[in-house]
Amino acid sequence: KGPDPDLVAIVERMATVKHKILVLSGKGGVGKSTFSAQLAFALAAMDFQVGLLDIDICGPSIPKMLGLEGREIRRSNCGWIPAYVESNLGVISIGFLISNPDEAAIWRGPRKTGLIKQFLRDVDWGELDFLVVDAPPGTSDEQITIVQSLEATGIDGAVIVTTPQQVSLIDVRKEVSFCKKVGVEVLGVVENMSGLSQPLSEFKFTRMTETGEQKDMTEWAMSYMRENAPEMLNLIACTEVFDASGGGAAKMCNDMGVPFLGKVPLDPQLCKAAEDGRSCFSDDKCRRASAPALKMIIEK
Ligand code: ADP
């Protein structure tokens, strides 16, 4: 039996890609796509030629996070053409191909893995410094397909995104074991939604009245602070939202011998930047809360 023609074609296709980074998570909803999108934005802002490949069949959210909703895949003689945010940031998402993601979520395995292989084989990225791959959550057949298909082309490693709670960390352990088993280096683990971080000046304040209603006190609180302690308006209020008494991702990384990359707080402005399809690095409000943390992680 000769070599698998799909694999040969993938190796050929990936020959023009210098670095391949997988973004993984044990669960959905922990911020894997948000991190992938912001990583791609940041690398592009550093003048690298970047491709972002979204093969999260369970819920492709990359088109929205990159401001490319409603795009469809165009084809040329050389293959599928990415949608470009900037000339050095090209994006391909399963979301460009399927109008109804709910339908894809119930596809049977072979159909999903077939589509993933096609994405790896047929996209005409051209020369890339980095290909960021937003993979499906968990350790499913789809993930195995991605790793097996890319292995021969050399994967630089995986970044695993998690939230601080035990329920999410248990799945990250599985993810780390998966990487070790298939020989993919864990570049590190990012703890996302690690506490809520918000400038005091953006809070809404309320007071419970005697009749149990919430009375808006924002204007009162703001003018009180402005008059009596204006420096308070520069403070960032931090709240632990999830129970991280078990030591969070940092302890788990220590136990498992993989690098801990850092914590990104829950930041309403980061969520908004993602909804609007923008980079959080260009957003003044994110710059105070989540952007510095993300920047440190990406530089690592
Ligand atoms: P996943 O890819 O793991 O399923 P997403 O990246 O789609 O998760 O994130 C789920 C939701 O949480 C999105 O609406 C996203 O904008 C939001 N989100 C992710 N990380 C943060 C954060 N640090 N602060 C605020 N919102 C966040």
Image: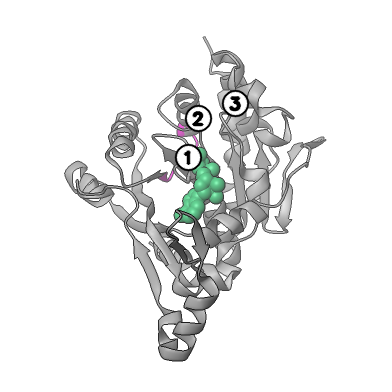
Q: What is the x, y in percent for residue 56?
A: 56, 33
Q: Residue furthest bottom?
A: 227
Q: What is the x, y in percent for residue 221?
A: 47, 76
Depicted 200 relative to depicted 239: above or below: below
Would you say the beta carbon of the disc 1 residue lies within 8 angstroms of ligand 1? Answer: yes
Residues tagged 2 and 3 counted as in contact (Cβ below 8 A): no
Q: Indicate the amino acid at tag 1.
A: Gly
Q: Residue furthest left?
A: 255
Q: How many marks?
A: 3
Residue highlighted by disc 3:
117
Q: Indicate the amino acid at tag 3.
A: Lys
Q: Which residues are magenta?
A: 151-157
Q: Indicate the amino acid at tag 2.
A: Ile
Would you say the beta carbon of the disc 2 residue lies within 8 angstroms of ligand 1? Answer: no
As drawn, is 251 to the left or to the right of 288?
A: left
Q: CA distance from mark 2 to mark 1?
A: 20 Å
Which of the 4 image quadrants contains residue 114?
Answer: top right
The kind of secondary structure element at disc 2 is helix
Residue located 46% across and 33% down the image: 137
Residue highlighted by disc 2:
146
154 in magenta: yes
As drawn, is 221 to the left or to the right of 184?
A: right
Give the dominant element type of the magenta stretch: helix, strand or loop: loop
Of callouts 3 and 1, the N-terminal one: 1
Residue located 27% across and 47% down the image: 243
Which of the 4 image quadrants contains residue 80?
Answer: top right
Q: CA distance from mark 3 to mark 1?
A: 24 Å
Q: What is the x, y in percent for residue 62?
A: 62, 44
Residue highlighted by disc 1:
29
Q: CA distance from mark 2 to mark 3?
A: 7 Å
As drawn, is 231 to the left or to the right of 52?
A: left
Of callouts 2 and 1, the N-terminal one: 1
